[in-house]
Structures are given as C-alpha cells and as structure tokens.
Image (cartoon, coloured by chain):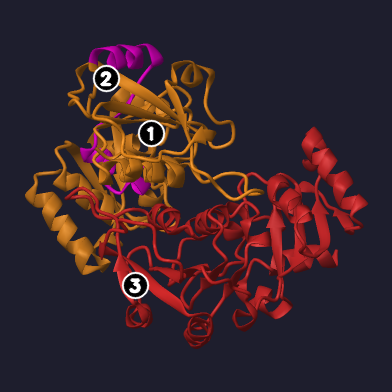
Chain colours: A red, B orange
Amino acid sequence: VKLLTVARDLKRRRARERNTRFVAEGVRTVEELLRSPLHADGALVSSTLTSTPRGTALLESLRAAGVPVLEVDEHDFASASTTESPQGILVVADIPQRDPAQLALGNTARVLVLDGVQDPGNVGTLLRTAAAFGVDATLAMPDTVDLWNAKVVRSAMGALFRHQALACEWEAFDALRAVHRVECWAADASGEPIDRRPEMHSIALIVGNEGGGLSREARARADRRVGIPIAPGVESLNVAVAAGILLYQLRP
Amino acid sequence: VKLLTVARDLKRRRARERNTRFVAEGVRTVEELLRSPLHADGALVSSTLTSTPRGTALLESLRAAGVPVLEVDEHDFASASTTESPQGILVVADIPQRDPAQLALGNTARVLVLDGVQDPGNVGTLLRTAAAFGVDATLAMPDTVDLWNAKVVRSAMGALFRHQALACEWEAFDALRAVHRVECWAADASGEPIDRRPEMHSIALIVGNEGGGLSREARARADRRVGIPIAPGVESLNVAVAAGILLYQLRP
C-alpha cells in the first residue's frame, strides 16, 4: 500500500522534487517508459488494465521487466490517478538526474529553451516536437511548468524519457552558452522570418510564456529575434505550433 | 432564467445542432465574439466578472452592444460553465450558417480539411493556425469533434468567429473540389516533404485522426501525400504542429 501513498503524493511538485520520482500513467506512456532507460520503481494496476489485450500484454511486460506490481481496486486507483478515464495503469519511476553542465552538445547543436511556458499540454507537445526534429536538449527555465507534471509526461508521449529535457537556471544557461558557443535566437511576434538555412553553428531557440511572451532574462540574452509572418488581425500562433515551424526551419 | 437553462443545455452537441446556438465562455473569448460579426443572444454573468477591470469593461461593452445580460450567483453560473475556474462570463450566440456550396474561393485558395480530428484542443489550435496563415476555409468532416464544442471555441481564441470554419460531408467536398479545381494533398507520416513553394493553384490539405491517421474517404481523394521528415524512433508530430508546418509551407 506504500506505493499507493507515494503515487498520490507525487501529484504535488514538491513531493516529486523531494523524492526525485514521478508518475507515468496510461498504457501508451508506460509502454514508452519500459522502452526507455528510466528506472521503474513499481506499478499500480487495477482490473481495468486487463480488459484489453494491449493492457494484458503490458502487465506481462512489467512482470518480465521485474517491476513490482501492486493490484488495487478501481476506487483506490482513481485516488492516485490524474486522468478522467483511468486505464488502470500507472508507474512510479525515478526522475533522471540531468545536469546542464554535463550536456554533450556537438558543433551544430539545437537547444530548445522554455521561458515560462505554463500549459502542461503545450510543454508536452514542445518536447515531442523537439525530439522529432533531433533537438539535442530542452531546457525548462524558471516559471515553466514542472517537466515531470503528470499532464506534461502524458502529452510528451515518451519524448521526456529519451530526449534530454531538464530544468535549468539562467546562470547555468549562460555557462552552457559560453562553453558550447551557442547563439540565442528568441521567438517573438515581431521577429524577422528565417528565410534560409542557418549557418553551421549551435543555436538555442527561446520560446516565451503563452500570454506574456519573453521574460526580461530571455530578452537580455537574445542575439536575434525570429518570428513567423501571420495574417493581420490574428493575435498569435500557439507556442507549440510556432516552435514547431521554427525548429523545422532550424534543423541542421 | 431561461438563458441559464439554454446555456446548460448547449453543453450537448444535439442541443447545439437543434438550436443552432453555442456558448462562448471566458473574458477573452467573449471579447473576440463582440468584435466578430456573430450575433450574441444573451450573456450570463456572475460577480466574478467584475472582480477585474478587464471584466468590468467587458460587461460595459456587452451592455453598450445591446446584449441582454442575466446576473446569476456563482453556483448557478458554475452549473452552465464548462471550465474548472469560471471567469463569470458566458454568452449564448448563433452558430453562423456556413454552406460548403457557397464558399467563395480564389484561384490560389488554401483549404484545411479535418478528417476525424477528435481532440477539441487540437481542433481549436488548428483553427487558430489556419486563420493565422490566411487559409480560406476549414472543413470539419464526419467523425471530427463538433466545431462549436465549448473547448474548441475556447482554444480557437476567436478564430472560429471570423475564419470560415464549417462542417462538411464528403459529397459536398467533392463538389467543391470540382467547382474550384482544388488539388487534395493529404498529410501522412510517409508522405514526401514539400521542398519548394507550390504552383499557383488551389490546394486542400487533409489532416487525419490523432491515432488512426487518414480515413478511407480521405485516402481515396488524395492527389498527393505530403509529410515532414522526423527523427527515427519518434512516432509522430502532434497534428496541429504538423499542419502548422505544412500550411506555412503552402502559403500562397
């Protein structure tokens, strides 16, 4: 029953930070977790899981991987779940300890910098997009939603488990910029369009908060502002859509 | 109190279709509605609205526009609301009667076709993106979530009120294709990248369901399949991100 208490507790960011553990919930997310290098501490399962062949297969995979499984009733499962329609499977796993000072970046690295992005669904989609376009690392700066929030984990669809996504402070970012000679490009509605493939060097793309845009810290570090021309009268693009277009244009 | 009953009822798709009315909720969405040509039948307001200057200004705008305002307590407001943290304002408005047979399209039109896109947040973001890139119309084909669903309305951020978004059947789409000489390009993971600006003709971009991809109907109509190259091992891009990149590449 300890696993149940831990899983409930991990809904809070504080608890995740103290325990350096998070919860991966749902059939697909747990499948991705098992395929990743992350360590699973234990699985919480209800009878809903084995109502589908895919769920039954997942339970077998968990057992084969040596992950301790605790079976609970629907009511207890729901108390730990963060979804409206639980699929009867969640796993408590270790948050990987990723350090900005130890990131390995090549000569034409791409880094995505989340500057106060607040919506968990947006952050999940941003991580998925970064992984798809071969971005080397995604940095979650202060005021960005916790990367290990259950909804971020779910909407990242596994990208968080393999892609180098990590929390970062501006000081550590400055050190990383200097060491790896990374140019800072900040996404901004009034920025200039990217009209040709960038030169062969490393670039960090900074995207700001959904409503407020770039922070003072980000603006101070921007070597260049880039944007996407849109129709007059339309306020802005969704942050994940805008970042998707820019990262696609920036692919090395 | 009739407005309260109507607003509650409009949570259901059936009721929206029968009444040809929908609900726009939240300060920002209602501000956008007032700036649009759509007709507002009445506003439901709780005291939460006037707790901010922006909300107070909106209430004045509603009165100045001659929209009947019904004030209710928080409890009644919550019963009609579809958000977790209501801002104390929702408006019942007429669904504009848009007909695929009467769409005005130029010689280099762009049409976005939603082929069974199910997530309301994705559809809202797709509409916002289509409006931003000057897409002429967005067609919601069978099995796509209702365009006038409260969460679609909210995440479209006003795009639904001015952009020509409408439900459509495949037969009506075929007629539109023939009349306007529209080429069908279907987004598909294995499609070829768009490597240059398209010729001067009209193009409909079809995007499929989040999990299942393109329908049989869509595949049968595709003149060409287009895609975005992504890193190996990453399953796919989010549908709104993928459509954003393709629509950006397809802008006339």
The vertical placement of B64 against A226, above or below, is above
Report which residue position mark 2 lands on.
Answer: B100
Disc 1: host chain:
B
Image coordinates for residue A238, horizontal then vertical, percent? 37, 54
- Report crowding for label 1: few under 14, some 14 to 19, many 20 or more residues within 10 A (C-alpha): some
- Depth check: B29 or B181 in front? B181
Image coordinates for residue A13, horizontal then vertical, percent? 61, 73
Which residue is found at the position 62% from the left and 70% from the top?
A12
Q: Is residue A192 left or right of residue B9?
A: left
Residue A66 forms part of the magenta stretch: no
**Which segment is the magenta one?**
B152-179
- Mark 2: which amino acid? Pro
Spatial CA span between label 2 and label 1 = 27 Å
The vertical placement of A151 against A214, above or below, is above
Report which residue position mark 3 lands on.
Answer: A214
Look at the numbered disc 2 and give the secondary structure of its residue.
helix
Look at the numbered disc 1 and give the secondary structure of its residue.
helix
Q: Is residue B82 left or right of residue B229?
A: left
Image coordinates for residue A175, horizontal then vertical, percent? 52, 87
Disc 2: host chain:
B
Look at the numbered disc 3 and give the secondary structure of its residue.
loop
Q: How many marks?
A: 3
- Mark 3: which amino acid? Leu
- Depth check: A224 or B89 in front? A224
- Residue B80 shows in this picture: no
- Report crowding for label 2: few under 14, some 14 to 19, many 20 or more residues within 10 A (C-alpha): some
Report which residue position mark 1 lands on.
Answer: B9
